[in-house]
Amino acid sequence: MAIPGAVVLLVVIVLVIVAVSGGGASKSPSSAIDYSPAAAGVVSDATNVPLATFNQVKVPSGSASAPTVISKATPLTLNGKPEILFMGDEWCPYCGASRWPIVVALSRFGTFTGLKTALSSGSDVDPDTNTFSFVGSTYSSPYVSFVAVEMQNTSHATLQTPTAAQAKILQTYDSQGSVPFIDFGNKYVVNSTYDPAVLQGLSWAQIASQLADPSSTVAQNIVGSANFMSAIICKLTNGQPGGVCTSAGVQAASSILASVK
């Protein structure tokens, strides 16, 4: 039986619509960016650590490499404010560990929106470290600008490509291309914060809920690292805001930072 021309035309139109909308194709894991928004409770705990906890923890209890001081470099700025540049890979457990104090510290100077949850590689050291992803997030602050480049996903596939300027910064101040790489206004570079083994076996909620407890190993490492980052940021902002920069935790970190050459 012949098929009416109108029916054939309708089928063709439907197929075209499906093809354009992507309904018949799936994205490969290496190209898909489909992250779950971080739970509201996790974000709240990570971005609202009590001042008393910062002041009791002071500096990290574990070992971490000292920041590298950059001398006589052109200041790194964005929108008229000092820029903090984070470059990392989502498979990297050390990057995963570092995102926690970044979020904790920067939340003292501004506001994150759109944070996602992520896991480090399941086949690397400290596998499946629970962390955040900065993909699709935004940060606003009257004091500093924050730029994050998540270069590779958990499968080591390209996720975000650095600009030529960002790649040059990484090459200039970290010739080995180590990650995480955190440039604070071309004044300091931080590569390591604390051992990601601290987070092993802990869920996002368990990590976040311990941030307020100064006796917890989690807080001592994450909040202590955040105090160091806060002390560096306070140097970029000329001590603003005063309530953060004059706090006991930041002052303790600043006294140690002053000895770094």
Image (spheres, helix red, strand yellow):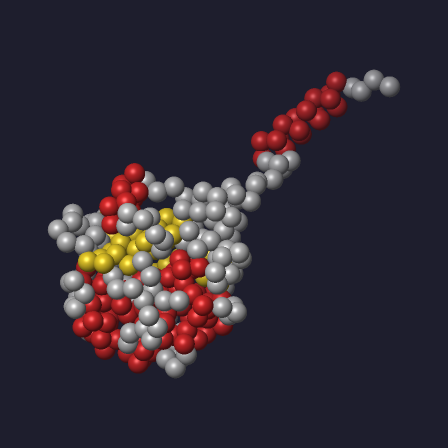
Outermost residue on the right side: it is 1
Nearest the viewer among 45 and 160 is: 160
Residue 116 vs 201, above or below: the answer is: above
Q: Residue at x 65, y 26 (%)?
A: 13
The quarter of the picture where the C terminus appears is bottom left
Residue 147 vs 196, above or below: the answer is: above
Q: Position of residue 149 (x, y in %)?
A: 37, 48
Q: Residue at x 35, y 55 (%)?
A: 180
Q: Residue at x 63, y 27 (%)?
A: 16
Nearest the viewer among 25 and 8 is: 25
The quarter of the picture where the N terminus appears is top right
Q: Position of residue 26 (x, y in %)?
A: 60, 40
Q: Position of residue 56 (x, y in %)?
A: 30, 81
- State left or right for residue 90 relative to residue 238: right
Q: Residue at x 16, y 68 (%)?
A: 258
- State left or right for residue 60 relative to residue 75: right
Numbered-mark total: 0
- Would residue 175 be visible to someone looking at this image? yes
- Would residue 47 be visible to someone looking at this image? no
Nearest the viewer among 210 and 168 is: 168
Q: Quadrant of residue 68?
A: bottom left
Q: Position of residue 201 (x, y in %)?
A: 52, 69
Nearest the viewer among 174 and 37 is: 174
